[in-house]
Amino acid sequence: MKTKKEKRRYFLKKLGITLVIPLFLMVIGATMMLVPLWGMIGQAMTFSSLIFYDPNVEVAQTEFMINNQSMYLPKIGDPFATLSIPSVNLEVPILQGEGNAQLREGVGHYVGSLLPGEGGNVVLSGHRETAFYPLKDVTLGDRVFVQTDYGTYEYQVSDIYITTPDDVTPTVPTEEERLTMYTCYPFIKWGATPERYIVVADLVQIK
């Protein structure tokens, strides 16, 4: 006949088998599911954060020279140029930053990229259902113009492709000046947009 101590030990052992072990396995299983999910969220935020840029970020008013003119980096929200693509009747203002306020008024300039005339990658983003909806009709060879106070920059479309939100290569700096425009894809008025539409144009001349 078992003593009270033996009965208690048997009860605790049985409790551990029926509750603790399954609970432990549940925790491990949940962790295995959350780790990949967290990675996917992080990758998506890497690229989507460019489209929903924090409007409260301050941009230092650094002075620099473009075309022998003294320039200052535009403040967040400031319009500083006009983008036009005659082949698709697109003409919109370019504003500094990629917050919702800027994208409601035109297209946004990614502050981590350069300005026209600085000789590198100029990155612009816009909403697929408004400012950048005409991008769907752009074709290779089309001319793109960016008019600024210090000159008009003419580009020619050299590449069009679709990529995933975690692909940050469109924003990578380049040695030669180019214009990189991107928006969500597909071009629909509502629903999920799991991809990004990229249009790249190389600098042709400065007027």
Image (tube, rainbow, N blue to C red):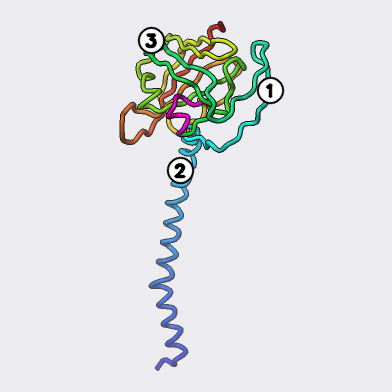
Nearer the observer: mark 2 or 1; the answer is 1
The image quadrant where one finds the C terminus is top right
Q: Which residue is mark 1?
A: 63
Residue type of the residue flagged with mark 2:
Ile
Please state which of residues 29 and 111 is positioned toward the viewer in this rendering.
Answer: 111
Residue positioned 45% across, 29% down in the render = 103
N-terminal of the pair, mark 1 or mark 3, is 1
Q: Residue at x 33, y 26 (%)?
A: 187
Q: Secondary structure at mark 1?
A: strand
Q: Amino acid at mark 1?
A: Glu
Q: Secondary structure at mark 2?
A: helix
Q: As displayed, is residue 99 above or below residue 178?
A: below
Could you say which is closer to the camera, residue 166 or residue 58?
A: 58
Decide which of tag 2 and tag 1 comes sooner along the chain.
2
Q: Which residues are magenta?
A: 101-109
Q: x%, y% of residue 44?
A: 46, 38
Which residue appears at 42% of the width and 87% of the height? 7
- Amino acid type for the residue under numbered disc 3: Ser
Answer with left or right where residue 159 lies relative to residue 74.
Answer: left
Q: Check disc 2: other Cα within 10 Å, few if <14, some if 14-19, many if 20+.
A: few
Where is residue 43 drawn, in percent x and y?
A: 48, 39
Near mark 1 (Cα within 10 A), the count class, few <14, some 14-19 or many ≥20, is: few
User: Pointer 3: what residue?
Assistant: 87
Q: Measure the alpha-carbon separation of dots 2 and 3.
A: 37 Å
Between 67 and 47, which is closer to the camera in this rendering? 67
The disc, 2 or 3, on the residue closer to the chain's N-terminal end is 2
How far apart are labels 2 and 1 at the CA level? 37 Å
Dot label at residue 41: 2
Quadrant housing residue 120? top right
Residue depicted at x 48% and y 33%: 99
